Image (tube, helix red, strand yellow):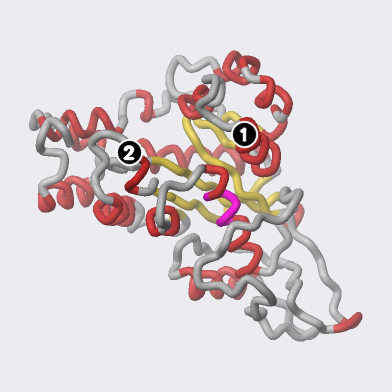
């Protein structure tokens, strides 16, 4: 019964400079693991490249990184690239990116996200900040199905994070509707998890790198799905931080018998392979991404 499962959207933030096969594999392995638990159904994946002002050495423009990400997921029916973070005036924290997508999903779908403790003040681009119009003119004889809900989501967001899962019944709350007592509202459990590798999880333990208040929101209000890299002792990492220990139940570590490719496939290795003409670059990057890089002459110099 899919309606009894927690519906999940996986959100990955990062430079994606460039996006690798390992990044996509991380989404696939996370979805596979969450489905195997029997508790979750993953209905979408979002890739959110970082803003140009992040200041990382060798970071190519967001125009190129967005294009490469779109090429990398062009054959996926559930992973989408979101440009919101790149289109802001300046760099955004991971916390604010999560809050943006939480608010946007709530406005577009009408769903009440079950893991939200307090509403965010993060503005939503293109949406009025008071009394947004309902997207559905619902009636009591024909409740929106999953196909209609996420079809509308695709129209509204330009297929940013639209999927159409096979679900018999998908109930939701439209807080803007005023249909009286005849309409029975039901709440689904919809969560946005931050998807990351164990290296990002480990960065939470570095003093001063993350604000404690942001960590509380990321781990406490949203939650994290971690895909470990080879050799990473996630249990040790979790016990090294008081905040991670506090919200340990909100951190899902993907257990996989095989080695995760991101242990050997990284954006840094990909750039080095491109600079040195290493044929192994085809193991790191998909062919459409390689073609785009060569056509645009990216990462050729030692500084990029």
Q: Please state the horizontal and vertical placement of residue 73, each as a whole percent of the image.
A: 35, 53
Tag 1 residue: 215
Quarter in which the C terminus is drawn? top left
Residue 189, quarter of the rendered image: bottom right
Name the residue rendered at 26%, 34% in the picture: 57
How many residues crowd around disc 1 within 10 Å: few (fewer than 14), some, or many (20 or more)? some
Please determine whether, in this image, residue 29 is positioned above or below residue 257. Answer: below
- Can you give x and y, in whole percent of width and height, for residue 69 in the image? 32, 51
Local packing at callout 2 (Cα closer than 10 Å; few below 14, some 14-19, many 20+) is few
| Region in magenta | 97-101
Residue 125 drawn above or below residue 136: above
Image coordinates of residue 181 in percent, x first then y, are 91, 80
Residue at image mark 2: 55
Q: Secondary structure at mark 1?
A: helix
Residue beneath the point at 55% across and 20% down:
207
Comparing 139 with 269, the one in front is 269
Residue 298 is left or right of residue 226, and the answer is left
Q: Where's residue 242, x and y in %?
A: 68, 20
Picture quadrant where residue 38 is located = top right
Alpha-carbon distance for marks 2 and 1?
22 Å
Q: Residue at x 76, y 69 (%)?
A: 173
Q: Is the residue 279 above or below the residue 51 in the image?
A: above
Numbered disc in front, either 2 or 1:
2
Q: Residue at x 45, y 15 (%)?
A: 231
Residue 303, magenta (yes or no): no
Query: Left of 92 or right of it: where is 100?
Result: right
What is the magenta segment's predominant secondary structure? Answer: helix
Is residue 100 one of those drawn in magenta? yes
Viewer-proximal residue, 95 or 168? Answer: 95
């Amino acid at each position: 019964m899919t309606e009894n499962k927690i519906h999940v959207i996986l959100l990955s933030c990062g430079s994606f400079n460039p996006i690798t096969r390992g990044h996509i594999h991380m989404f696939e392995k996370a979805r596979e693991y969450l489905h195997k638990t029997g508790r979750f159904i993953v209905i979408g994946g979002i890739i959110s490249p970082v803003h140009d002002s992040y200041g990382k050495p060798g970071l190519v423009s967001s125009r190129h990184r967005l294009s490469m990400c779109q090429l990398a997921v062009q054959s996926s029916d559930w992973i989408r690239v979101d440009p919101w973070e790149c289109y802001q005036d300046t760099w955004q924290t991971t916390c604010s990116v999560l809050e943006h997508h939480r608010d946007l999903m709530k406005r577009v779908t009408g769903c009440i996200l079950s893991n939200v403790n307090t509403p965010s003040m993060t503005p939503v681009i293109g949406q009025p900040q008071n009394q947004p119009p309902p997207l559905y003119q619902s009636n009591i004889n024909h409740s929106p199905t999953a196909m209609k809900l996420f079809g509308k989501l695709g129209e509204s967001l330009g297929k940013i994070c639209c999927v159409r899962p096979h679900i018999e019944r998908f109930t939701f709350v439209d807080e803007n509707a005023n249909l009286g007592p005849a309409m029975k509202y039901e709440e689904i459990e919809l969560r946005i998890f931050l998807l990351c590798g164990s290296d990002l999880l480990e960065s939470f333990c570095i003093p001063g790198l993350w604000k404690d208040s942001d960590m509380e929101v990321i781990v406490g209000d949203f939650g994290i799905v971690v895909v470990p890299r080879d050799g990473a002792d996630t249990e040790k990492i979790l016990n090294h931080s008081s905040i991670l220990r506090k919200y340990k139940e909100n951190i899902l570590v993907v257990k996989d018998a095989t080695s995760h490719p991101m242990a050997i496939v990284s954006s840094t290795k990909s750039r080095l392979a491109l600079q040195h003409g290493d044929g192994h670059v085809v193991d790191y990057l998909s062919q459409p991404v390689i073609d785009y890089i060569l056509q645009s002459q990216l990462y050729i110099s030692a500084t990029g």
